[in-house]
Amino acid sequence: GNSVTQMEGPVTLSEEAFLTINCTYTATGYPSLFWYVQYPGEGLQLLLKATKADDKGSNKGFEATYRKETTSFHLEKGSVQVSDSAVYFCALSDLRYGEYGNKLVFGAGTILRVKS
Amino acid sequence: DGGITQSPKYLFRKEGQNVTLSCEQNLNHDAMYWYRQDPGQGLRLIYYSQIVNDFQKGDIAEGYSVSREKKESFPLTVTSAQKNPTAFYLCASKGGGNQPQHFGDGTRLSIL
């Protein structure tokens, strides 16, 4: 079945450090890939997405590239801020199969803490 | 502004009691979802509905029930059969094709 694996956290960085959060997936077909962010006590917000191989999603300085050959979608940011402290979820959605057509499969989430 | 509204933000349940969590969307989305989030875990799908008057069980449907009488609304009932209901519950909706799911702000359910 489909699954998503994220690096375990928490990840603790100083302000302006480089961020990488690893995400790999297992899926049949051609999934769309997403990164969502969750701030304390809130729901999930879409951060970025990619719908096919070699697509790069980007938003608010965050980037992730859909790598089919390594089944990965790692999240990166060149210079993190304290306000980036949150939980980050990698997810996939496979639209090729009816049963999973509109469902998301989530990773366990990675806590990011940025210190000033 | 379009969005998803979940209520209440906090809910307390007594032993043997059923409680209902509300989810309303004005995004004109066909599909709606309920997820459960436990500490240190990802989201797990409880139920989903792709169209009015139709819904399917997700991965952890036991002890929960839903209805979809209107496109805008997808309430979740946590029944007394759910023995460990304490969690953060998230509702989502989605438009067609490659559109992403949009989430509400969640309801935190606790046991008295």
Image (tube, rainbow, N blue to C red):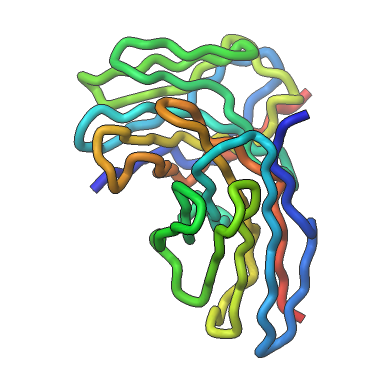
Q: Residue at x 69, y 38 (%)?
A: B26
Q: Residue at x 77, y 81 (%)?
A: B112
Q: Is residue B29 left or right of residue A72?
A: right
**Location of residue A67 by image quarter:** top left
Q: Is residue A66 left or right of residue A41?
A: left
**Location of residue A31 by image quarter:** top left
Q: Position of residue A99 (x, y in %)?
A: 29, 48
Q: Position of residue A43 (x, y in %)?
A: 67, 43
Q: Position of residue A34 (x, y in %)?
A: 46, 28
Q: Residue at x 55, y 55 (%)?
A: B34
Q: Is residue B16 left or right of residue A91?
A: right
Q: Position of residue A14 (x, y in %)?
A: 68, 22
Compare residues A12 and B79 and report the one nearer the observer: B79
Compare residues B71 and B5 and report the one nearer the observer: B71
Compare residues A86 and B94 and report the one nearer the observer: B94
Q: Residue at x 53, y 72 (%)?
A: B64
The quarter in which the N terminus of chain B is drawn is top right
In the figure, B63 relative to A65: above or below?
below
Number of numbered discs overlaid on the protein picture: 0
